[in-house]
């Protein structure tokens, strides 16, 4: 099992290029199910979740080609025949996004068998909103042996009001509604850039969808969709993680190929902490503005402060002067990094959904365990400023969502190395 060894204390200097967004690429790959034609996606990140989704589509009968050489971030998907519309547990057990194929499979083939989703242990992501929506569109859904089985002759347009904001629920039902008969009206939709990205692809494929990026989306169902070429959005969470890396190490980093418009809530909080930012059209430069100041954050749906940046920002707050309070409103189990940060010398106490950080502690190197994707990133950031050499175990969580993280960090002066098992197999 791979580990990172990180020696802290180096300010990061230089430029980091941001990869495509995993959370945009996954639903866009699922959208290829909706047509027999070829869908070409560019700016696809090379991360483990993408490889898992590729295996999933191939297991259903799709042809998926991942580019190589200069086209290594491009993939072409052709779902001419879907001989086996099943999302098998062995494939999807490590990935949350398995539920994203439910809507497109029913819309295209009239039936789907999907294993209940797996992924990070940060809390429940109930699939009941997907089920409720598909049932409103005329699907019959049963659950047995850990699988959801759904059937429908042809889905019908429906008026759906989401009980709570759900990104994957919005995406899943949008794909289903694109091929449904008649019009659909969705209210209380997720407004994330990843939803807008998916809608851009669907419309390029011939769908008729209006209102992406707002809480109300209208979909006029069409009989057939065709192939398209689409470029995936830059990853706002990767961009945010590296912005914090620049700020916490007192470096001078240019975060390039990103979309600063998607980073509003994070940039505002960084400035509140005293971080100096120069915001361009497709880049943000972060440089040391002296001592960091405490700030409170509360995670919310987009355009609020993202839950996927909470752990990384908490690491930054351990280095800020004063006391900060972090409130996690999206997931109930998203403070698993706190124990590991405290082992490195942080002073963080948790009560329910609130964490109190008493900042200004010099972090010490330690052997720590990565528990989920964003907690892993938080521990990398902590190790970058810790005194001595830290060992991070279970970095496979990191590989699910960050493309070549250690190489990008090494390129700007971090002392970081990936190691396999120290002694190898017996």
Image (cartoon, rainbow, N blue to C red):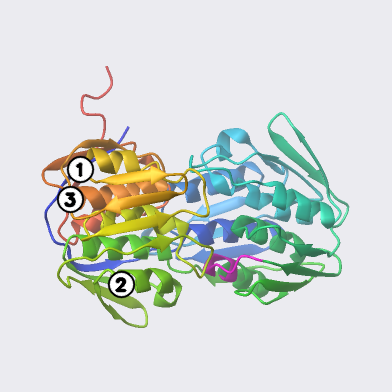
Say if the magenta span includes residue 243: no
| Label pair 1/3, CB-CB below 8 angstroms | yes
Instruction: Give how far apart the Cα atoms at labels 2 and 1 are.
Output: 24 Å
**On-image quarter of the C terminus:** top left
Residue 345 numbered mark, or none: 1
Instruction: Give how far apart the Cα atoms at labels 1 and 3 are.
Output: 7 Å
**Residue placed most toward the observer, 344 or 3:** 344
**Residue placed most toward the observer, 193 or 41:** 193
Residue 272 numbered mark, or none: 2
Residue range corresponding to the magenta coloring: 189-196
N-term-proximal mark, 3 vs 2:
2
Q: Residues within 10 Å of mark 2 (few under 14, many from 20)?
A: some
User: Of helix, strand and loop, which one carries label 2?
Assistant: helix
Residue 165: percent from left, percent from top: 63, 60
Kindly identify which residue carries mark 3: 361
Say if the magenta span includes residue 191: yes
């Amino acid at each position: 099992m791979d580990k990172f060894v990180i020696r802290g204390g180096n300010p990061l200097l230089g430029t980091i290029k941001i990869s495509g967004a995993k959370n945009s690429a996954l639903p866009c790959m699922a959208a290829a199910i909706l047509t027999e034609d070829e869908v070409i996606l560019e700016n696809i990140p090379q991360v483990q979740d993408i490889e898992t989704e590729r295996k999933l589509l191939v297991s259903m009968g799709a042809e998926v080609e991942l580019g190589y050489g200069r086209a290594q971030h491009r993939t072409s998907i052709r779902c001419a025949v879907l001989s086996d519309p099943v999302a098998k547990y062995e494939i999807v057990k490590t990935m949350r996004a398995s539920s994203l194929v439910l809507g497109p499979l029913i819309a295209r083939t009239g039936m789907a068998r999907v294993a209940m989703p797996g992924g990070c242990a940060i809390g429940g992501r109930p699939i009941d909103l997907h089920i409720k929506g598909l049932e409103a569109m005329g699907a019959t859904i049963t659950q047995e042996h850990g699988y959801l089985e759904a059937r429908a002759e042809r889905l019908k347009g429906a008026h759906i009001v989401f009980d709570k904001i759900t990104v994957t629920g919005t995406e899943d039902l949008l794909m289903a509604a694109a091929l449904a008969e008649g019009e659909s009206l969705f209210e209380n939709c997720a407004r994330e850039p990843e939803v807008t990205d998916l809608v851009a692809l669907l419309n390029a494929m011939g769908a008729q969808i209006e209102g992406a990026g707002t809480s109300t989306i209208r979909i006029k169902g069409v009989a057939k969709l065709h192939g398209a070429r689409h470029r995936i959005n830059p990853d706002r969470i990767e961009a945010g993680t590296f912005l914090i890396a620049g700020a916490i190490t007192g470096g001078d980093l240019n975060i390039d190929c990103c979309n600063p418009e998607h980073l509003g809530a994070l940039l505002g909080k960084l400035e509140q902490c005293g971080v100096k930012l120069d915001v361009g059209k497709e880049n943000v430069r972060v440089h040391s503005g002296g001592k960091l100041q405490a700030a409170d954050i509360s995670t919310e749906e987009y355009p609020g402060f993202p839950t996927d940046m909470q752990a990384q920002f908490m690491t930054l707050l351990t280095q800020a002067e004063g006391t900060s309070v972090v409130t996690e409103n999206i997931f109930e189990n998203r403070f698993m990094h706190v124990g590991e940060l405290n082992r490195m010398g942080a002073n963080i106490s948790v009560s329910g959904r609130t964490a109190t950080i008493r900042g200004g502690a010099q972090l010490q190197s330690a052997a720590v365990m990565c528990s989920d994707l964003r907690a892993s990133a938080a521990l990398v950031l902590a190790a970058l400023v810790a005194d001595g050499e830290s060992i991070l175990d279970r970095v496979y969580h990191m590989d699910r969502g960050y493309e070549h993280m250690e190489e990008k960090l090494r390129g700007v002066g971090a002392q970081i190395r990936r190691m396999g098992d120290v002694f190898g197999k017996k």
